[in-house]
Amino acid sequence: MGFYFSGEGRISRKDFWLRWVLVYLGLSILVTIVDLFAFSDLTQRLGGSGPLSTILSFLLIWPSFAVSAKRFHDRGMSGWWPLWLFLIGIGLVIVMVVGLFMTGLDMEGLAAGYEPDFTNANPAGIGLLALSLLALIGLGIFQLVVLGFLPGQTGPNRYGPDPLRPELGQPA
């Protein structure tokens, strides 16, 4: 259980993908299926996010931070990176919402599913919306590349021994 709840130490890319990403995706798919069948009316009223999916999302916040911190540690980076990226992401979502309201689009019409009418939209709002969306996508790509694709530091570092070569010993 320390793998999911402790942010100390290092984990390899293999452990990240097999023990975190696949487990996360499997749980998400299973809970979504249960939501669709057991809570279909409530899931529809909530806009597609069922009660179990919402609960699972909250329960997986800490494990997400813990596993991400260990992957950043494996790269020789601070375990605080997941928190900073999360806060930056929240800031970008806020900027996106501000940009959406600045566009002057009919929010009630959008919520009801009507096609947006961009003929009288404020270009500054559209620009802010687009830039913040691109920055959010870039943030996600950065995190995916660092956590999922870049190799960890060879040998021990200040966060612990190399998960691929623990026999090399502890850091000096």
Image: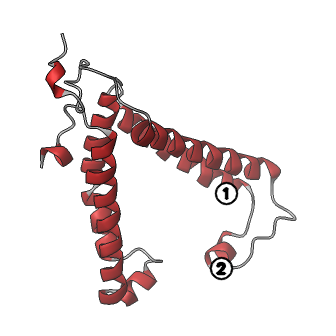
* Residue in the foreground of this view, choosing between 31 and 50: 31
Residue farthest left in this picture: 1
Q: Would you place residue 52 above or below residue 104 in this image?
A: below
* Residue in the foreground of this view, choosing between 57 and 162: 162
Picture residue at 29% right of the left edge, 67% below the top: 27
**The disc label shown at residue 100, or none:** 1
Say which amino acid is labelled 2. Answer: Gly
Picture residue at 28% right of the left edge, 65% below the top: 56
Residue farthest right in this picture: 119
> Is residue 79 toward the left or the right of residue 48 in the image?
left
The residue carrying mark 2 is 113
Badge 2 crowding class, 10 Å Cα cut-off, few under 14, some 14 to 19, many 20 or more, is few
Say which amino acid is labelled 1. Answer: Leu
From this viewpoint, is residue 144 visible? yes
Picture residue at 32% right of the left edge, 59% below the top: 22
Q: Are marks 1 and 2 in contact (CB under 8 Å)?
A: no
Q: Quick one: SS at disc 2?
A: loop
From this viewpoint, is residue 79 visible? no
Residue 105 x/y as whole percent: 74, 65
Q: CA distance from mark 1 to mark 2?
A: 15 Å
Residue 127 x/y as whole percent: 75, 47
> Is residue 17 toward the left or the right of residue 89 in the image?
left
Q: Would you place residue 49 above or below residue 97 in this image?
A: below
Residue 142 x/y as whole percent: 51, 38
> Is residue 87 toward the left or the right of residue 5 in the image?
right
